[in-house]
Image: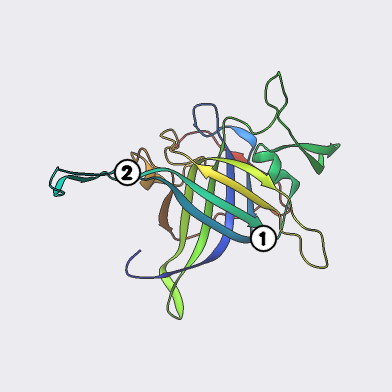
Amino acid sequence: MAGPGSIIGVTAIRIARLTANGTPDFNNPLGGFMLCGGVSKFEHDFEIETGADIYEEDAAGNSCVVRKKFDKVKRATFKLTLCRNDYRISEIFGLSSAVTSGQTVIGHAVKTSVGCGASAGVTPNGVSLELWSEQWDCDSPHATPYMRAILPRCYLSPKGYTRENGVALPEFDGFSTANNNWGDGPFGDADPMVGQTGWCYAEMDDYQVPTCNTPLTYVNIPGAAS
């Protein structure tokens, strides 16, 4: 970002499946999904482990030891709220199985964990999540018009929503961990992130937003050629 700017909204969100070690699921025609518009709100934060605050006095009541250890970032946390939903979003998040009629996805079925057996719920592989927001400089677009937020390995859980005289807003809670196998991303278009390690959340300038399919469908994750 060349100079100060303001972040506005979410223009698009892109999801990609990962493999067991966090590497993007390359060469998978059903590996990704992208939604342009339709995000009501994305809120992120960080879970912090507070460092010990050590204080000890001597027998005269004077300070003997004063030591504050550093706080540590454990992971990024977030809440995603949609105003435009698609059954394939929950499926690719690993929260449900697709209900199909022929080749058409017409619904989804939320998985549950089961006793005395393997969990049928959230996939252990997680997903990559990228979001694009506008960058604005006072009353005009910024020199770099978009900011891309990247969460390299996310695990999500579904939340219920209200059906009423208004728009139902599906919500997902999630957290993001470090993923040193993310590289330049599932689609090979995040070269500046190569060599970065130990990160759970990143922001970077971007000059354009990837194009959404019309009509919406799964997005092919190409081979790792870049």
Q: Name the residue: 43% across, 33% down.
A: 181
Residue drawn at (49%, 60%) of the image: 208
- Where does label 1 land, which residue? 38
Foreground of the two, 46 or 18: 46
Based on the displayed image, in which of its 4 quarters is residue 119 positioned? top right
Crowd class of label 1 (few under 14; some 14 to 19; many from 20; radius 10 Å): some
Q: Position of residue 142 (x, y in %)?
A: 42, 71
- Specify the farthest residue to the bottom: 139
Q: Quadrant of the N terminus?
A: bottom left
Q: Is residue 141 above or below residue 53?
A: below
Judge left or right: residue 156 versus residue 64. Answer: right
> Would residue 164 appear left or right of 189 to someone viewing this image?
right
Instruction: Name which residue type carries label 2.
Output: Gly
Circle 1: residue type: Gly
Quadrant in the picture for the C terminus: top left
**Residue 49 appears in the picture as rendered:** yes
Name the image quarter holding residue 35: bottom right
| Cβ–Cβ under 8 Å for marks 2 and 1 | no
Residue depicted at x 82% and y 63%:
164
Q: Of discs 2 and 1, which sits in the foreground?
A: 2
Question: Label 2, label 1: how many angstroms apart (C-alpha)?
Answer: 39 Å
Closer to the camera in the image, 185 or 22:
22
Give x and y (percent) for residue 69.
26, 43
Q: Is residue 26 visible?
A: no
Residue drawn at (42%, 79%) of the image: 138
Name the residue tied to disc 2.
51
Measured as percent of width and height from the top left, residue 153 is found at: 51, 39
Per the image, label 2 sits on a secondary structure element best described as loop
